[in-house]
């Protein structure tokens, strides 16, 4: 890296950005008030010369990538004169990223929970980062949330350096308007590619191996040609959830851009599944299904039992929600970074969930998941555009309460986290700060033993009942 670059301000590094208005799609608009975030731990195993995960290297490569490929990141959302939502990039009024370095006066291991690594003779322990303990005991304030309701807050990045430790953690929070989960990982890999190039050559003129497809115009043109279907979950909410006592304007863009930030949910828990237990679970439930489907069935039924104990009564209905990547089910570039992912919702009578075998429940969940495709995604977009109240009604209903059981899974198991290498190796421990939805779980790969981590948001007191579930305990190790 050039020594002169360390003295450059963020404004200096963004000087090459051009004025432009970048179109936002319906799925982008639906994400206002929501964030995408991550927390990755890197270990200095090479003991290379120079600063490990240099702050200036990370900052410079990030900003240069924004200039070259992702100007939307420093734009400001608005409605143009044609009434369309755009991200306006004005070099004189950029929405600057908030990038900072934090020195933690504790070693990283003070916030790690250890388990024996049964999958490897070389590594004695698998480490899990306890984010709740970290914020309770470290003295570090919780990472600010990305938001458009404060200036210069749509992108938050923190580099955490720990006392007497080889670990450096990279934490980020960005507005979900910019990326969906897959798009975020594409971006993180591009950032890492820029950092590696800058680290090895000292030059910032990186040529990405596979540049991103960021234009929403191509996506909008594609979906303009698709006829929507009538998904069962949309019919369900229309027929079973009372309408809101308000009307929405025909142009939803101003309404959604003004959406308040959803409150964060900080009761976070982690369940770990070793490779052996994952496969044993799949074989026990239905060896013809994937691990993801089998695990969803297991957790959905356990949630009903836990909620029945919490509320002293069985819920009337169980909602099982599974996120899917629209890139894989549409004629769209796989390197498209905008919002194209949706969720499939299975509204299942509680008695059906409780009385079904895991195999039958997994089959039912699989059937709902198999319905999704471009026509399904178009139906979701059409509903947002023409019946915005239904979107809000659904979001209020999808929760754990005396009437409803809710389990949602965002499966990130096969995401390319390994290649998010800034020139110092892959991340060793994957985590994230917080999520905005109670009942939602993220499935991360665990590279230490080859298993998976299920990071799950559920009230602390309720989680104690979930830990007592005998079927779930056969396969899960409850870390915290």
Image (tube, rainbow, N blue to C red):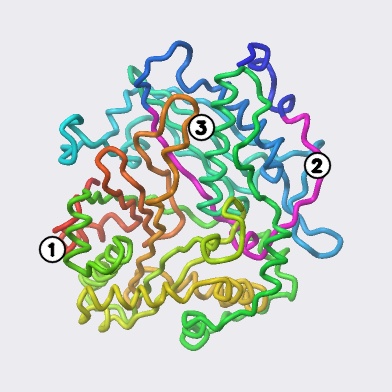
Q: Which residues are magenta?
A: 14-42
- Which of the image's four quarters has the N terminus? top right
Mark 1, Cα crowd under 10 Å, few <14 / some 14-19 / many 20+, is few
Q: Indicate yes or no whether the magenta region holds residue 36.
A: yes
- Farthest-out residue, front: 209
> What residue sits 35% from the left and 34% below the top?
428
Q: Earlier in the sequence, mark 3 or mark 1?
A: 3
Q: SS for tag 3?
A: strand
Q: CA distance from mark 2 to mark 1?
A: 57 Å
| Residue at numbered disc 2 | 90
Of the residues under marks 2 and 3, which one precedes in the sequence? 2
Task: Read off the residue under disc 3.
Answer: 158
Q: Position of residue 109 (x, y in %)?
A: 28, 28
Residue linked to disc 1? 470
Tell me the SS state at disc 2: loop
The residue at the far right in this view is 81
């Amino acid at each position: 890296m050039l020594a002169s670059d360390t003295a450059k301000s963020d404004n200096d590094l963004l000087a090459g950005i051009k004025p432009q208005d970048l179109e936002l799609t319906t799925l982008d608009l639906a994400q206002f008030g929501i964030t995408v975030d991550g927390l990755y731990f890197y270990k200095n195993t090479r003991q290379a010369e120079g600063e490990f995960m240099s702050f200036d290297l990370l900052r410079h490569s990030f900003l240069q990538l924004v200039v070259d490929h992702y100007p939307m990141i420093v734009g400001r959302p608005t409605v143009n004169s044609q009434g369309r939502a755009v991200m306006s990039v004005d070099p004189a009024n950029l929405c600057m990223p908030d990038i900072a370095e934090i020195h933690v006066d504790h070693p990283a291991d003070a916030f790690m929970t250890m388990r024996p690594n049964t999958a490897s003779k070389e590594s004695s322990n698998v480490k899990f980062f306890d984010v709740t303990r970290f914020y309770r005991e470290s003295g570090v304030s919780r990472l600010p949330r990305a938001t458009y309701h404060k200036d210069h807050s749509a992108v938050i990045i923190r580099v955490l350096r720990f006392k007497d430790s080889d670990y450096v953690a990279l934490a980020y929070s960005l507005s979900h308007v910019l990326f969906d989960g897959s798009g975020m990982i594409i971006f993180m890999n591009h950032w890492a590619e820029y950092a590696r190039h800058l680290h090895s050559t000292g030059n910032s003129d990186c040529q990405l191996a596979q540049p991103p497809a960021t234009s929403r115009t191509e996506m909008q043109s594609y979906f303009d040609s698709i006829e929507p279907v009538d998904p069962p979950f949309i019919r369900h909410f229309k027929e079973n959830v009372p309408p809101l006592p308000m009307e929405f304007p025909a142009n939803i863009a101003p309404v959604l851009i003004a959406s308040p930030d959803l409150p964060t949910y900080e009761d976070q828990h982690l369940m770990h599944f070793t490779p052996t237990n994952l496969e044993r679970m799949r074989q026990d439930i239905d060896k013809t299904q994937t691990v993801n489907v089998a695990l969803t069935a297991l957790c959905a039924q356990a949630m009903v039992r836990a909620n029945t104990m919490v509320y002293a009564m069985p819920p009337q209905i169980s909602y099982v929600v599974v996120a899917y990547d629209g890139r894989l089910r549409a004629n769209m570039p796989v390197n498209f970074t905008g919002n194209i992912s949706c969720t499939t919702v299975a509204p299942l009578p509680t008695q059906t969930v409780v009385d079904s075998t895991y195999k039958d429940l997994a089959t039912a969940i699989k059937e709902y998941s198999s319905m999704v495709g471009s026509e399904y995604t178009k139906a979701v977009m059409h509903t947002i555009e023409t019946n915005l109240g239904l979107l809000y009604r659904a979001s209020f209903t999808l929760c754990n309460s005396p009437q409803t059981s809710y389990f949602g899974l965002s499966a990130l198991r096969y995401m390319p986290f390994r290649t998010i290498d800034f020139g110092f190796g892959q991340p060793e421990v994957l985590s994230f700060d917080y999520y905005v939805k109670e009942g939602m779980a993220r499935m991360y790969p665990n590279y230490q033993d080859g298993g998976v981590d299920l990071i799950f948001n559920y009230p602390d007191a309720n989680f104690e009942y979930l830990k007592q579930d005998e079927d779930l305990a056969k396969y899960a190790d409850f870390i915290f």
